[in-house]
Amino acid sequence: AQTVTQSQPEMSVQEAETVTLSCTYDTSESDYYLFWYKQPPSRQMILVIRQEAYKQQNATENRFSVNFQKAAKSFSLKISDSQLGDAAMYFCAYRRNTDKLIFGTGTRLQVFP
Amino acid sequence: SAVISQKPSRDICQRGTSLTIQCQVDSQVTMMFWYRQQPGQSLTLIATANQGSEATYESGFVIDKFPISRPNLTFSTLTVSNMSPEDSSIYLCSVEGSARNTEAFFGQGTRLTVV
């Protein structure tokens, strides 16, 4: 069965600095999708970034980028120039084709001014 | 993208009662998903709701406890039946994007507290 592991329950970063959130997953599949979702206190799940496993190039969305290491089954999220509004729970998620999303346990990110 | 309206946003209920949560999408979708997020935990899929057929429940979740309706392609309800304090959670509705294998979109969640 596929599993997603986030080994950092909490992380903190100074405003304007860079932080990296870790995620590893376990799968025997070669074709799948990976996501990072942000959940602020409002509870709304917001997609931050997605990566198709067949693409070698790491996805980038403005200040957010990933380091996708397929062989190592690692999918870390880098947040550059951190802002106070980045404070939230971050969930890594895996999905094979049209199967359900499998979420990691989450990392709470605090941003200090 | 899809805009999802979920109601109520929060409720406090007495144990032994039932609460029905509504999820309305601004476009037609094939599958709708219901998740539970217990305090401080990750999201766990309860069931997948297809229009015109019975919902498919994940291990650990049963229809008698979490009956789901899917009367059309834009609407679904989840009922939490015979509630106990252990049912206190956030319940989220989700749909897939229109293109295959795109990300999931979520409602704003319902925070349920059972007293």
Image (cartoon, coloured by chain):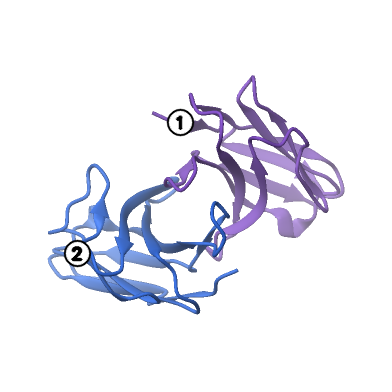
Figure chain in purple: A
Q: Which label sits on residue B21?
A: none
Q: Position of residue B91 (x, y in %)?
A: 37, 61
Q: Which amino acid type is shown beneath numbered disc 2?
A: Pro
Answer left or right for B79 relative to B23.
left
Residue drawn where x is 27% and y is 46% of the image: B58
Q: Is residue B29 above or below residue A85?
A: below
Residue reaching furthest to the top: A72
Dot 1: within a 10 Å radius of its alpha carbon, few (fewer than 14), some, or many (20 or more) residues?
few
Verify CB contact (< 8 Å) between mark 1 and mark 2. no
Q: Is residue A54 above or below residue B83?
A: above
Answer left or right for B34 relative to A15.
left
What is the chain identity of the residue bearing mark 2? B
Residue drawn where x is 31% and y is 63% of the image: B50
Q: Which amino acid type is shown beneath numbered disc 1?
A: Thr
Q: Which label sits on residue B67?
A: 2
Q: Position of residue B64 (x, y in %)?
A: 12, 59
Q: The C terminus of chain B lies in which quarter of the figure?
A: bottom left
Q: Is residue B71 above or below residue B110?
A: below
Query: For mark 1, what is the residue?
Result: A3
Q: Colour of chain B?
A: blue
Closer to the camera in the image, A7 or A5: A5
Q: Position of residue A84 (x, y in %)?
A: 76, 57
Q: The N terminus of chain B lies in which quarter of the figure?
A: bottom right
Q: Position of residue A76 (x, y in %)?
A: 68, 34
Label 1, label 2: how far apart the Cα atoms are: 27 Å
Residue drawn where x is 60% and y is 51% of the image: A37
